[in-house]
Image (cartoon, helix red, strand yellow):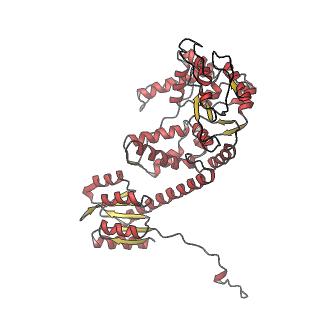
């Protein structure tokens, strides 16, 4: 305006966040009145119900962010109301109130899916703290689910979990390559989810209606790997009583994942190179060529370029595999995804074991986000599965694996708080890492030094979460 003042119409419009809608359910008029005053002063929109039946009518009429309910009421209970809310309005948080002598009721409510509980008489500060925390957790879950839906709609990878920048970039790369026939090389540490990514590529490809097969090359003895991949003719060797179609024939028209591709020996590298070049191979003991149309996805936790430089992996095979190379980020570089992964695994194992979905305290989520996770997503999944199986509904602290000892360190003998199984596992880890170093990273040689079969050694490496970075044999 001419006088220098600003017309209200020219001011930027600021939209205030919506006020949380809270439904208070209690048969005591005085309690309802007190709660209404305190929550309204705190900026919440409050509706009051005298019993669960009235509350259900209110819930059917309008959405609520949170229900605050007493446990003991005439005609019905807070637990019954909780069950109805969880069934019909699962996005609505529920906080229960109970008397001092009824703590078991509060525990039952937490098992039934309550966000939190309060012990009467309820203080104002505690009331606002608990409800604010429940509303914040609800908003966080809603935001995470919204982000995940956006990613699912944009990229179509409905089984992949994560909204961090590292994962969003990976989704974009996967979406770009999925519809092609290009060979893909997935490189990442053990436990990062490479097989899940391979499934996602297949499911988004033109081969989605055909077969997807995964082969762990490190888990199959060298003497059997050729037959497993390419099949054999009857009589090809002792025990070959009939013709066998290998994985490549079984996956004809579809996709095959060759996991731990860096573990195959030079003989098999030559065989695989021929298949990638021509789509042809011969069964063990056969004389005629078999032709297949198979898309190959390879995965490894090794640095294949280094393997090529040091003569352990054929350069021509590497170039055939490295048409599209995607780096799978470790969990430590996508810590923002940890709360979402925790929720996903908690729901998965609660459902699979008929257990309640546990509630993780803020300090537990913080500790999970700060942990190193040498075993990546697989290790996190095992930790959450254990928490669910042990039946902890309100998790205030969580057990995490100890950090791996240095390779030259002995077993933690005599240390307080270290059990015998932990000490034995630490010594086993140290011996395996030492043998792998001495063998230059070749598992077959390391297995011979340790008196193990190669498949047994590979099983122990996976069980102990031994990482490539721990076996730096340079």
In the picture, measured across the screen, residue 422 lies left or right of residue 443, that is left
Residue 328, image x, y percentages: 63, 40
Task: Return the x and y of residue 269 as percentages of the image width and height.
Answer: 69, 23
Q: Position of residue 28 (x, y in %)?
A: 27, 70
- What number of labels is visible? 0
Question: Looking at the rendering, which quadrant does residue 278 occupy?
Answer: top right
On the question of residue 412 being in view, the answer is no
Image quarter where the C terminus lies is top right
127 or 155, nearer to the observer:
155
Which quadrant of the structure image shows residue 444? Answer: top right
The residue that appears at 59% across and 56% down in the rendered structure is 150
State the residue in front, 385 or 199: 199
Q: Position of residue 360 (x, y in %)?
A: 44, 49
Q: Is residue 451 above or below residue 119?
A: above
- Depth check: give the residue in front, 344 or 153: 153
Q: Is residue 39 above or below residue 203?
A: below
In the image: residue 36, left or right of residue 324: left
Q: Residue at coordinates 35% horizontally, 65% vertically from top-left?
A: 123
Q: Nearer the viewer, residue 296 or 52?
A: 296
Residue shown at the point (68%, 45%) measured from the top left: 173
Q: Is residue 18 left or right of residue 4?
A: left
Q: Residue furthest bottom?
A: 3
Q: Is residue 113 visible?
A: yes
Quarter of the picture holding the N terminus: bottom right
Relative to 329, does residue 272 appear above or below in the rendering? above
Furthest toward the top, the residue is 238
């Amino acid at each position: 305006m001419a006088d220098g003042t600003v017309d209200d119409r020219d001011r930027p419009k600021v939209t205030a966040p919506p006020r949380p809608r809270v439904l208070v359910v209690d048969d005591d008029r005085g309690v309802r009145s007190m709660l209404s005053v305190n929550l309204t002063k705190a900026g919440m929109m409050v509706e009051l119900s005298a019993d669960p039946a009235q509350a259900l009518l209110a819930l059917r009429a309008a959405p609520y962010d949170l229900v605050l309910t007493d446990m003991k009421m005439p005609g019905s209970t807070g637990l019954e109301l909780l069950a109805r809310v969880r069934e019909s309005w699962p996005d609505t948080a529920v906080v229960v109130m109970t008397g001092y002598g009824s703590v078991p009721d509060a525990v039952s409510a937490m098992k039934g899916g309550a966000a939190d509980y309060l012990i009467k008489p309820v203080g104002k500060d505690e009331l606002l703290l608990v409800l604010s925390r429940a509303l914040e957790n609800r908003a966080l879950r809603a935001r995470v689910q919204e982000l995940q839906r956006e990613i699912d709609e944009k990229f179509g990878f409905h089984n992949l979990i994560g909204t961090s920048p590292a994962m969003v970039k990976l989704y974009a790369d996967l979406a770009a390559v999925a519809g092609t026939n290009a060979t893909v090389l997935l490189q990442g540490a053990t436990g990062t989810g490479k097989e899940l990514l391979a499934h996602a590529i297949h499911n988004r490809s033109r081969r989605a209606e055909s077969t997807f097969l995964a082969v762990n090359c490190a888990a199959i003895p060298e003497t059997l790997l050729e037959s497993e991949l390419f099949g054999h003719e009857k009589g090809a060797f002792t025990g070959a009583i009939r013709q066998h179609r290998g994985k490549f024939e079984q996956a004809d028209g579809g996709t095959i994942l060759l996991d731990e591709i860096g573990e195959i020996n030079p003989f098999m590298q030559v065989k695989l190179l021929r298949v990638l070049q021509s789509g042809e191979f011969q069964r063990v003991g056969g004389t005629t060529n078999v032709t297949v149309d198979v898309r190959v996805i390879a995965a490894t936790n090794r640095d294949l370029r280094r393997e090529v430089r040091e003569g352990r992996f054929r350069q021509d095979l590497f170039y055939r595999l490295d048409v599209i190379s995607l780096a799978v980020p470790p969990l430590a570089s996508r810590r923002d995804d940890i709360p979402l992964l925790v929720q996903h695994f908690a729901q998965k194992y609660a459902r699979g074991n008929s257990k309640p979905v546990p509630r993780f305290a803020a300090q537990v989520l913080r500790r999970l986000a700060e942990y190193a996770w040498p075993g990546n997503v697989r290790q996190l999944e095992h930790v959450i599965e254990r928490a669910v199986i042990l039946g902890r509904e309100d998790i205030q602290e969580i057990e995490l694996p100890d950090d791996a000892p240095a390779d030259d360190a002995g077993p933690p003998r005599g240390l307080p708080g270290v059990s015998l199984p932990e000490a034995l596992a630490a010594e086993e880890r140290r011996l395996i890492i030492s043998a792998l170093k001495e063998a230059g990273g070749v598992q077959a040689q390391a297995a011979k030094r340790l008196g193990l079969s190669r498949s047994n050694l590979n099983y122990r490496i996976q069980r102990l979460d031994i990482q490539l970075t721990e076996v730096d044999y340079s």
